[in-house]
């Protein structure tokens, strides 16, 4: 076959000739700030964690700054979700999970067995990988947390629901169908509803466990925009597999590998001149 | 970067999962599938034919019918009986489809038609057997009169009211306790190793209890509820009496052979069914919902009450209603607990003497006068109608709640 068919060209030179070279858009990262100048929300010292016999986290020392976005990156199974789930003690639900060390939220030791987990989880909201709206109306979904924790009049509750939905950039899309089932929303809308549900109880910290991994690019962009807006009010910790997302959305990045905290620094530093070789290999895509 | 590496280049084909693996070709796979289908269809149809034949002969034996002299009646009986069985099978298949599968209009119509054919087939079978129509006993007075020494005047009013009383007691006790047990076993699983062993032991025993013959529960109920282990005197000289036995409010210890004892005995019978069905329904609720609620700072109990329980209500309701229809049809444990043949009045209070529909039918069927056997058949028609209504309510409830949730 002499005819030139660009779609099936296998040799590198013809491919290069037919396909235009596309430069990936430069990722805009936030300005580096000195960690010492920031107020610290969560601090971990000598933090170790086990699942029965498996040592999942080794001696983590980490300071998460207030009102900034901190991203945890790393290959699967490196312990970043485990670490995240210790911050609101969701790991308590897992049989055999235990930890040692200190984990402070604004000076309160969260690992104290006497610490009220319910109160802690009100202060530390969480958004999961897969959108998990309750099989209730949109209104009831957002009002679920406030109804648990606050005593308020019906009109106040309505206002709170509206404010939460506005914060989650969802109000305009759902204001006419608050009584409809939340399961009728699209995936991206459902995830933003989950964020609205989390912010409705006015938490101090918002944990996000791969919040965009089940979403399409457009919804991902919406959620990322939302994250940078929410940064003004909440301390956000986000676990992500997508390094571009970490670079775009976060101020600080922690790279974890096999249960170790390999490198923790301002996002710009991590992505432009990482100090550790493993970090460099990971962010350039050589492994993971 | 990661995206670029994820796209496979056309140059290198996907490597085989393991070396020296020979995959089955498409035609081979098809042949295997067809073979399986053929075996399944053949064995299923064979077993259905054998089952029909067996059931027909058992039914004839049980009803004491001898058609040898009348071949025409033989044919009529077989066809009417087959119609009943086939429509029952169709009803069950389509009904299960409605309950657990896609809900379509055609399935609904199939269920309705099959239910009608089932009742018709039953009536036809019953009337052919005796050569005398059952319909003449199915009058209005049949539902409003007590048993009589003239078959034409006999009715099952006390039995119907008795059934309602007993089932009300059974439902009021069995559903809360059963659903509560299911929640405890499913939602509050202990993390402690010793407690976990206790939990699995309880779980195993509940599953086993579902298979215990109901007459065993009858004797248990007799000891535990009727006599109360003799702790409170005898049935005739109770230790504690509140109110008068003639009034609507009357309580005594021990319970004696009354509605309360029978209802509690039936509660024991249906308890495993409700627990297992509710556990299944709770297990079907995705864990992500529980985690979502807990992460918002809900306690375990708030999570169950606000999220898990509402999401599993359709399954729990269906299980409970089906358990209740089992309770309504249960004769053996009631026979042990009540031991009363003839009763003219419905129960006055929770301790009152009573009879229930299956028991009344049993008594009619064991009468010497053969007309009573037709009265029993009429009673069966009423009982079946009530059961079908129960199951229809179950289907309706499930449909309604499922629609609300999704």
Image (cartoon, coloured by chain):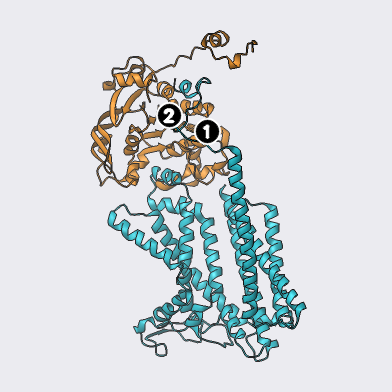
Which chain does the numbered disc 1 sit on?
A
Question: Which residue is identified by label 2?
Answer: A230
Image x and y of residue B189, in percent: 36, 54
Of the pair B398 and B279, the residue shown nearer to us: B279
Question: Which residue is identified by label 1?
Answer: A188
Q: Which badge, 1 or 2, is on the more N-terminal residue?
A: 1
Question: A110 left or right of A149?
Answer: left
Does the residue at mark 1 contact the one at mark 2 (Cβ under 8 Å)? no
Q: Secondary structure at mark 1?
A: helix
Residue drawn at point x = 39 percent, y = 30 percent: A238
Q: Is residue B351 visible?
A: no
Question: Circle 2: is it few (<14), some (14-19), or many (20+) Cα within 10 Å?
Answer: many
Figure quadrant of the N terminus of chain B: top left
Question: B356 left or right of B53?
Answer: left
| Res A111 quadrant in image | top left
Image x and y of residue B298, in percent: 39, 47
Question: B110 left or right of B303?
Answer: right
Of the pair B237 and A80, the residue shown nearer to us: A80
Q: Residue furthest right?
A: B72
Colour given to chain B in the rendered image: cyan
Q: Secondary structure at mark 2?
A: helix
Q: Is residue B20 visible?
A: yes
Image x and y of residue B173, in percent: 46, 69
Foreground label between 1 and 2: 1
Which chain is in orange here?
Answer: A
* Label 1 – label 2 distance at C-alpha: 17 Å
Residue drawn at point x = 71 percent, y = 62 percent: B113
Of the pair A230 and A29, the residue shown nearer to us: A29
Name above or below for residue B134 compared with residue B391.
below
């Amino acid at each position: 076959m002499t005819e030139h068919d660009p779609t099936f060209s296998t040799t590198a030179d013809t491919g290069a000739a037919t396909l235009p070279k596309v430069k990936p858009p430069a990722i805009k990262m936030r300005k580096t700030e000195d960690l010492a100048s920031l107020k610290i929300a969560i601090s971990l010292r000598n933090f170790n964690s086990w699942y029965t016999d498996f040592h999942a986290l080794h001696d983590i020392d980490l300071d998460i700054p207030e009102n900034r976005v901190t991203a945890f990156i790393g290959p699967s199974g490196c312990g970043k979700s485990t670490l995240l789930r210790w911050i609101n003690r969701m790991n308590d639900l897992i049989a055999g999970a235990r930890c040692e060390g200190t984990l402070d939220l604004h000076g309160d030791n969260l690992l104290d067995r006497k610490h009220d987990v319910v109160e802690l989880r009100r202060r530390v909201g969480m958004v999961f990988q897969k959108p998990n709206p309750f099989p209730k109306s949109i209104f009831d979904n957002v009002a679920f947390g406030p109804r648990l924790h606050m005593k308020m009049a019906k009109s106040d509750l309505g206002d709170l629901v509206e404010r939460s939905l506005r914060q989650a950039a969802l109000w305009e899309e759902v204001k006419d169908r608050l009584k409809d089932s939340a399961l009728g929303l699209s995936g991206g809308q459902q995830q933003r509803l989950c964020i609205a549900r989390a912010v409705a109880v006015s938490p101090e910290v918002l944990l996000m466990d791969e919040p965009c991994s089940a979403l399409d690019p457009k919804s991902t962009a919406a959620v990322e925009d939302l994250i940078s807006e929410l940064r003004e009010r909440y301390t956000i910790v986000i676990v992500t597999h997508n390094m571009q997302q970490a670079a775009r959305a976060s101020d600080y990045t922690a790279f974890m590998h096999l249960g170790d905290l390999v490198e923790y620094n301002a996002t710009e530093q991590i992505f432009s001149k990482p100090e550790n070789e493993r970090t460099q290999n990971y962010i350039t895509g050589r492994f993971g | 970067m990661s995206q670029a590496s994820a796209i496979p280049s056309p140059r290198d084909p996907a490597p085989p999962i393991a070396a020296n693996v020979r995959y089955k070709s498409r035609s081979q796979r098809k042949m295997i599938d067809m073979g399986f289908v053929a075996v399944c269809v053949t064995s299923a149809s064979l077993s259905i034919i054998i089952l029909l034949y067996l059931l027909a002969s058992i039914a004839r034996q049980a009803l004491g019918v001898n058609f040898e002299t009348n071949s025409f009646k033989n044919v009529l009986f077989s066809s009417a009986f087959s119609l009943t069985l086939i429509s029952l099978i169709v009803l069950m298949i389509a009904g299960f489809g409605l309950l657990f599968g896609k809900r379509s209009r055609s399935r609904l119509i199939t269920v309705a038609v099959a239910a009608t054919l089932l009742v018709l087939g039953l009536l036809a079978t019953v009337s052919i057997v005796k050569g005398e129509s059952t319909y003449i006993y199915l009058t209005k007075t049949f539902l409003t009169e007590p048993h009589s020494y003239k078959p034409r005047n006999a009715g099952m009013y006390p039995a119907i009211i008795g059934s309602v009383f007993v089932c009300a007691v059974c439902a009021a006790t069995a559903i809360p306790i059963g659903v509560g047990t299911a929640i405890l076993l499913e939602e509050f699983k202990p993390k402690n190793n010793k407690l976990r062993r206790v939990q699995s032991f309880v779980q195993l025993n509940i599953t086993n209890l579902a298979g215990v013959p109901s007459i065993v529960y009858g004797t248990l109920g007799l000891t535990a509820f009727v006599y109360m282990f003799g702790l409170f005197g005898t049935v005739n000289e109770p230790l504690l009496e509140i109110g008068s036995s003639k009034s609507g409010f009357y309580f005594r210890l021990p319970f004696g052979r009354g509605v309360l004892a029978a209802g509690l005995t039936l509660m024991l019978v249906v308890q495993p069914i409700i627990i297992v069905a509710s556990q299944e329904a709770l297990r079907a609720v995705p864990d992500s919902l529980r985690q979502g609620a807990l992460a918002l700072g809900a306690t375990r109990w708030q999570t169950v009450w606000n999220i898990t329980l509402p999401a599993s209500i359709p399954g729990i309701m269906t299980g409970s209603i089906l358990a209740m229809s089992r309770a309504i049809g249960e004769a053996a444990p009631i026979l042990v607990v009540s031991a009363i043949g003839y009763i003219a009045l419905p129960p006055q209070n929770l301790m009152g003497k009573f009879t229930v529909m299956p028991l009344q039918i049993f008594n009619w069927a064991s009468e010497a006068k053969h007309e009573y056997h037709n009265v029993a058949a009429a009673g069966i028609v009423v009982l079946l109608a009530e059961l079908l209504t129960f199951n229809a309510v179950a289907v309706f409830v499930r449909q309604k709640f499922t629609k609300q949730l999704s």
